[in-house]
Image (tube, helix red, strand yellow):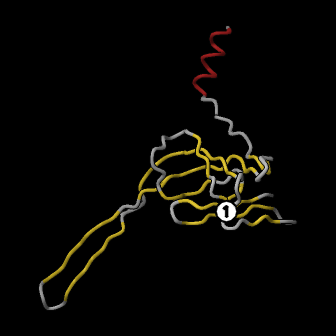
Amino acid sequence: MSYAIIQTGGKQYKVKAGEIIKVEKLNDSKPESMVDFKEVLAYGDDANIEIGTPIIKGAKVEANLIKNSKNRTVLIFKKRRRKNSRRKNGHRQQYSLIRINKIFSKDGKLLSEAEKLIKPVKKKEVKKEIQEKK
């Protein structure tokens, strides 16, 4: 199974095809759109690995943006004892949920590809089609 190490949002992620991960919010991206990560630090499989200095030129990882959202609230509470001074604040960090589709090597060769997602058919639609046939 091939993997790649990508850099986005100041962090590094080890990704495999078909994997769903949370990354820092990707600006100018809409849900259900394609995203390319060109900052690939390394890629390979169990037998061999290609490491960049610091990145591998020409290598890329394609992903689908599933949704943009916010994490749970992190509460910040500061208190100075015996001073009757306290402050309560909250923060919700934004993130993007992505699904890795393809990993390409530096010469453009496809290393690994995720399986296609099959959308489930709703039961109501099937019943309507059966009734129309009768």
Question: Badge 1: how crowded within 10 Å, few (<14), some, or many (20+)?
Answer: some
- Looking at the rendered image, the quarter that the N terminus falls into is bottom right
* Residue 71: quadrant of the picture: bottom left
In-front residue for pair 41/76: 41
The amino acid beneath tag 1 is: Ile
Circle 1 sits in a helix, a strand or a loop, which is it? loop
In-front residue for pair 40/68: 40
| x and y percentages locating residue 130 in the rendered image | 66, 15
In the rendered view, tell whether residue 72 sits above or below residue 34. Answer: below
Residue in the picture at 67% in, 8% down: 134
Residue in the picture at 66% in, 67% down: 54
Residue indicated by mark 1: 55
Left or right of residue 124, residue 28 in this image: left
| Residue closest to the far right | 47
* Residue 51: quadrant of the picture: bottom right
In the rendered view, tell whether residue 107 sits above or below residue 24. Answer: above
| Residue closest to the far bottom | 82
In the rendered view, tell whether residue 90 sits above or below residue 118. Answer: below
In-front residue for pair 37/133: 37
| Residue closest to the far top | 134
| x and y percentages locating residue 114 in the rendered image | 73, 46
| x and y percentages locating residue 91 in the rendered image | 33, 64
Tally the numbered discs.
1
Residue in the picture at 76% in, 53% down: 106
Residue in the picture at 71% in, 57% down: 16
